[in-house]
Image (cartoon, grey):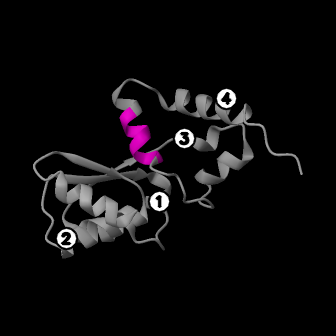
Amino acid sequence: MMPCALGLMKGLQGTKVVMSGGTQMAAVLALGKALDIEGDISIATTKYVDDDKSAGFRQIVEETSHLCYFSDPGLERSKIPGVQIYAQGYVKEGVGMGGAVIAASLYGVSQQQIVEETDRVLMTVELPKK
């Protein structure tokens, strides 16, 4: 994933790019800086990543001199305990959730709608039988 993201950063120079992800994408930004990849590049993640002080996300991004954006998906209001643990800091794998939430909000999707739709979709998933 990281070499692909670096290739996109290099190939999209001259275009505004918002990367979406947590510490892995922050590492990509740091690699891009080390490889002198320039451009209008920023990163979006969730407040859950930012709240995890052991991850050092904000420090890594600040050292690259790129902007970072944080979204609050509001998952503590989910009806599904497995989703609520994101807000409690136990899960870090959001697969670009921070950027997706920011993009959705730009199109008028509310935090409540994100939580309700997340619950609705997950409640329709049929788990495999053992």
Alpha-carbon span between mark 2 and mark 3: 32 Å
Horizontal side of 14 relative to 49 (left or right) equals left
Alpha-carbon span between mark 2 and mark 1: 21 Å
The boundaries of the magenta stretch are 97-103
**Dot 3 surroundings within 10 Å: few (below 14), some, or many (20 or more)?**
some
Q: Position of residue 89 (x, y in %)?
A: 59, 60
Q: Position of residue 7 (x, y in %)?
A: 25, 60
**Can you identify the residue that label 1 sits on?**
49
**Dot 1 surroundings within 10 Å: few (below 14), some, or many (20 or more)?**
many
**Can you identify the residue that label 4 sits on?**
120
**Can you identify the residue that label 3 sits on?**
74
Horizontal side of 44 relative to 116 (left or right) equals left
User: Please, what is the dominant secondary structure of the magenta stretch?
Assistant: helix
**Can you identify the residue that label 2 sits on?**
33
**129 vs 85, nearest the viewer:** 129
Q: Residue drawn 79% across and 43% down?
A: 127
Q: Amino acid at mark 2?
A: Lys
Q: Residue drawn 43% across and 39% down?
A: 101
